[in-house]
Amino acid sequence: MSDTSSPTAERLVAALAGRRLEGAARLALLPGWITLLATSVLVTIVGTEIPLSIQLAPLFLSVLLLGLPHGAVDHLVTPRARGTALTIRSMAEVGVVYAVLGSGYAVVWFLSPAAAFVFFILLTWFHWGQGDIHPVRELVGGNHVRGPGGTALTALVRGGAPMLVPLVAFPGEYRRVAEWIVGVVDPGAVGALDPFFTAEARLLVAALYGALVVGALSLGWVRRTDSRPWRIDAVETGLLVGFFATVPPLLAIGLYFCFWHSLRHIVRFLLLDEHVESEIADGAVVTPLSRFARDAAPLTALSLVFGVALYLLLPGAATDPGSLMGVYLVFIAVLTLPHVAFVSVLDYYDGFWR
Ligand SMILES: CC1=C(/C=C/C(C)=C/C=C/C(C)=C/C=O)C(C)(C)CCC1
Ligand SMILES: [Fe+2]
């Protein structure tokens, strides 16, 4: 990634935002906008018959590229947000939260993979939704998203796009991945999920999700004091829905996870350090991202050791791409529960639900 964006990117920002975005917003938002828009356009041209290896590539790359590492700085979140030093005690606390929540949820995967899968979808819906509140408020300046109800509504819309729209648009693919995931524990368990894939259930999901989108954007419209942030919110929401409605879900989720959710969280994390914040405001990209890479490296490596252990423990784990992806997603699920706890603490410090 270079420190200066291309003229095309600048024009895209100008068209979407009405004026130049500041350093942090550009770093956090632009790569996601370009990736989602370009992929939707490309898929519309070439069609959805994309080789599985290409569809899986971003998700597999997320092991090292942005995805898994975005959670590997959780031990630094609280000290940086509070401006306190990293101590053995604070690291031990993070270790205990990960051990208790992670192992507890791992046990549920072994006992009841279908229930654990449904919980994973609900958890991701919440988490990917909460992850979009900071950008809308702090980077785009959207004060139209406020109060517990308004914030929850926007979070449900933002997180609902990756979790619900593919169920409506690509039920076969969705079910196939669900089968990979629960299959690493019990290949027969996916049958319990069949009611979610019926035409009636998908129609209901589409209607409820459509109502959420209309509700959140209408409330935002009423509450706006400046229409630019609302416009960006509406365009981003449209982009997310369009992207997940057109791009096959494995590819779509892989790209979104790296270039949307994780990048936004990484920038939020970097902004906790005032020194890095001013670097980013000056337009630096490579230096802050390498600083993040250094911070995230030790726990990314440690988590991979646990990933391999999980692979060895899961009774249905095999070596085909579907099974490897299934293990990776169970592994992410187990890490996401404690990760959500730390992000929620950060949200609390930022006064999100007020
Ligand atoms: C891949 C994939 C799925 C699930 C992905 C999930 C649930 C990912 C969660 C990632 C998290 C929580 C990352 C941490 O921030 C679906 C929707 C079943 C269907 C299609 C493809
Ligand atoms: Fe996250």
Image: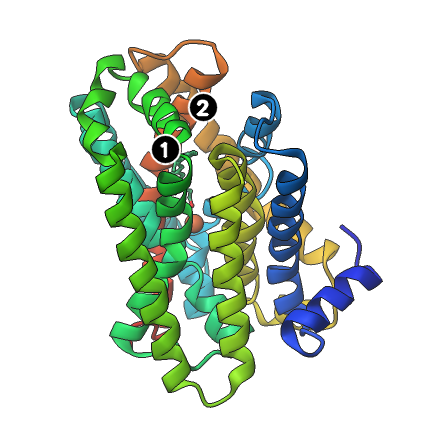
Quadrant of res 218: bottom left
Q: Is mark 2 on a helix, strand or loop?
A: helix
The answer to whether residue 118 shows anywhere in this view is yes
**Image location (x, y in percent) of residue 187:** 27, 13
Horizontal arrangement in the rendering, residue 351 relative to residue 22 (left or right)? left
Q: Name the residue under label 1.
A: 171
Q: Does the residue labelled 1 lie within 8 Å of ligand 1?
A: no
Report crowding for label 2: few under 14, some 14 to 19, many 20 or more residues within 10 A (C-alpha): many
Residue 345 drawn above or below residue 100: below
Q: Does the residue labelled 2 lie within 8 Å of ligand 1?
A: yes
Q: Mark 2 points at which residue?
A: 325
Residue 305 drawn above or below residue 268: above
Please tell me which residue lies in front, 338 or 32: 32
Q: Which residue is drawn at 43% across and 82% down?
A: 143
Mark 2 or 1, closer to the camera? 1
Amino acid residing under circle 2: Met
**Image location (x, y in percent) of residue 29:** 60, 61
